[in-house]
Image (cartoon, grey):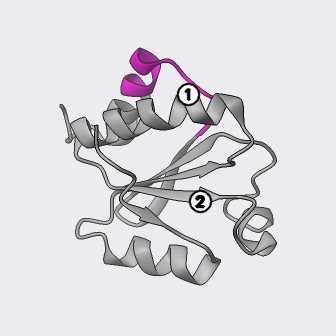
Amino acid sequence: MREMAKTARSSKALRAILREVPDGDAVVYFTATWCSPCRIFGPVLAKVAARMKVPLVKVDVDRVDPALVSRRPWRVRGVPVIFAYRNRRLRRRLVGAAREAALEEWFRAAFPDKED
């Protein structure tokens, strides 16, 4: 299983990471160390992202600038939550943990040209 590719600690850092992604496609994963569903969901998410060859950016809501999680376009109200960026534009959102099969479907819908 592949490690999380990058970790963002501020809005500026997250935007910089998203700019660095070669084709502008990435998944941003908001999580927290105290979140039990996140501990189960994180490895599954990393596995599916690696299989689909989509960069994954992890944001721990307790270790970042609070403005990052509260402002647009994220406005995170609970974790886990993931956001799909396609061509550097926010395209999809998934709130809550999902099983691997449902997560694969979400990835296929968000990134149709990146089949595993």
Q: In the image, what residue type sits under mark 2?
A: Val
Q: Within the magenta stretch, is there residue 71?
A: no
Q: Earlier in the sequence, mark 1 or mark 2?
A: 1
- Disc tally is 2
Query: What is the number of the mark on residue 59?
Result: 2
Q: In the image, what residue type sits under mark 1?
A: Ile
Disc 1 versus disc 2: distance between alpha carbons? 16 Å
Which residue is situated farthest in the front direction here? 34
Query: What is the number of the mark on residue 40?
Result: 1
Residue nearer the viewer, 17 or 34: 34
Circle nearer the viewer, 1 or 2: 1
Give residue 88's quadrant in the image.
bottom left
Using residue 87 as the reference point, say whether residue 78 is left or right of it. Answer: right
Q: In the rendered image of this protein, does residue 84 appear above or below residue 67?
A: above
From the image, which quarter does the C terminus lie in? top left
Residue 4 point in image, percent of width and height: 40, 53
> Pointer 2: residues within 10 angstroms few (<14), some, or many (20+)?
many
Residue displayed at 71% across by 70% down:
68
> Pointer 1: residues within 10 angstroms few (<14), some, or many (20+)?
few
Residue 52 point in image, percent of width and height: 24, 38
For mark 2, give the secondary structure: strand
Magenta range: 94-105
Residue displayed at 52% across by 56% down:
58
Query: What is the number of the mark on residue 81?
Result: none
Q: In the rendered image of this protein, does residue 44 appear above or below residue 54?
A: above
For mark 1, give the secondary structure: helix
Using residue 92 as the reference point, say whether residue 87 is left or right of it. Answer: left
